[in-house]
Image (cartoon, rainbow, N blue to C red):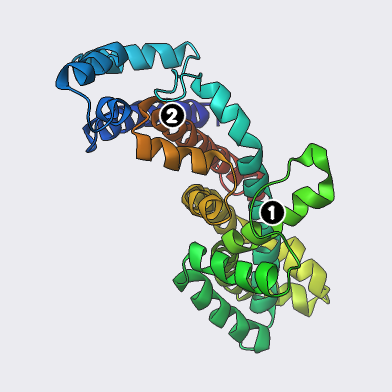
């Protein structure tokens, strides 16, 4: 086990190194020049070159990469080109809405998706199972922003039950905070609920068809014991894998959802940074989210042995 953990940590470092190089080149080689955007359309070439030199954009790419990597390893993620403020300070201000939305989305997706999948597998071929098939097709095919606009029209504009957009900090009241997050959470959760439920159903059906499950039923085991003590634990590995994979989709979904519901989170910050070619913000957000995704996958791999003792590395 210790050897496996060491190998996984080493591979994680290697993956993050490649991700860092890719992000740096992707941002630098993308069309657009922040110096031109900052200077304006009517600026002279001399002004643009001066801004480019001030930002260090006139240096060779290897030199820029070494400076960026060295500063990042020392905890300095740079300064925003347009606001002139530290990137970490900007991220800290936008982190609460994004974390709130992400946590609520994951909690709703996992709880509803796993429960729906277990029930559909237990009553395979029944009404709930057919309902899951229809719901999964809907959740997979309809984009998040379409679901968001539909929910806004029905629940916020037509009946005025919930706020249309915006975000209320948690320290201003739990009720107001939760009310502003209901619509974006539901809109963002629907594809994940469908995904988790389908995988849970398939895994549970495979386990329920095993001989030891029929033996447990013949011995008089209760439905609760068969589902949760025997079946769910043995079907937990693919379910946990899907939950880890879903985090990658969640990152992209948060950007769209925050844009639709005008939530001042990290997603909106990234969109504004892309429009302004604000390299430090784009690079910092991408490297931090990539690192978080890699760590989650590492945690999922290490958690396999806790779910299924038969797995040994």
Q: How many numbered marks does the figure carry?
A: 2
* Circle number at residue 164: none
Is residue 109 in sight in this rendering? no
Q: Check the image and name the residue furthest to the front.
A: 42
User: Foreground residue, 3 or 301?
Assistant: 301
- What is the distance, in whole Å, between disc 1 and disc 2 at their CAs? 25 Å
Percent x, y for residue 233? 68, 58
Percent x, y for residue 81? 39, 23
177 relative position to 254: left or right? right
Near mark 1 (Cα within 10 A), the count class, few <14, some 14-19 or many ≥20, is: many
Is residue 303 in sight in this rendering? yes
244 relative position to 212: left or right? left
Q: Check the image and name the residue furthest to the left.
A: 45
Percent x, y for residue 247? 53, 48
User: Foreground residue, 126 or 225?
Assistant: 126
Near mark 2 (Cα within 10 A), the count class, few <14, some 14-19 or many ≥20, is: many
- Residue 281 lies in quadrant: top left
The residue at the point 29 percent across, 33 percent down is: 27
* Residue linked to disc 1: 181
Label 1 secondary element: helix
The residue at the point 54 percent across, 57 percent down is: 238
Q: Check the image and name the residue furthest to the bottom.
A: 126
* Residue linked to disc 2: 281
Q: Closer to the N terminus: mark 1 or mark 2?
A: 1
């Amino acid at each position: 086990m210790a050897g496996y953990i060491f190998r996984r940590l080493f591979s994680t470092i290697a993956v993050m190194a490649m991700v860092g190089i890719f992000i740096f080149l992707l941002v630098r080689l993308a069309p657009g020049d922040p110096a031109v955007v900052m200077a304006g359309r009517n600026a002279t070439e001399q002004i643009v070159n001066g801004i480019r030199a001030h930002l260090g954009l006139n240096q060779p790419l290897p030199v820029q990469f070494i400076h960026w990597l060295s500063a990042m390893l020392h905890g300095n993620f740079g300064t925003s080109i347009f606001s002139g403020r530290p990137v970490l300070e900007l991220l800290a201000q936008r982190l609460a809405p994004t974390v709130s939305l992400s946590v609520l989305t994951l909690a709703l997706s996992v709880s509803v998706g796993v429960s729906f999948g277990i029930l559909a597998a237990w009553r395979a071929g029944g009404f709930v199972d057919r309902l899951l098939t229809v719901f999964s097709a809907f959740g997979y095919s309809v984009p998040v922003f379409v679901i968001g606009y539909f929910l806004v029209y029905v629940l916020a504009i037509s009946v005025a039950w919930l706020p249309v957009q915006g975000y209320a900090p948690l320290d201003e009241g739990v009720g107001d905070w939760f009310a502003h997050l209901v619509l974006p959470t539901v809109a963002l959760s629907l594809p994940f609920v469908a995904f988790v439920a389908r995988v849970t159903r398939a895994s549970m059906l495979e386990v329920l068809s095993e001989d030891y499950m029929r033996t447990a039923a013949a011995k008089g085991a209760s439905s609760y014991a068969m589902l949760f003590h025997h079946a769910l634990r043995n079907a937990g590995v693919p379910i946990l894998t899907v939950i880890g994979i879903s985090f990658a989709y969640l990152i992209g979904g948060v950007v769209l959802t925050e844009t639709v519901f005008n939530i001042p989170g990290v997603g909106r910050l990234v969109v504004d940074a892309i429009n302004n070619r604000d390299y430090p913000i784009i690079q910092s957000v991408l490297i931090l989210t990539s690192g978080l995704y890699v760590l989650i996958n590492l945690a999922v791999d290490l958690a396999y042995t806790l779910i299924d003792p038969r797995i040994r590395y």
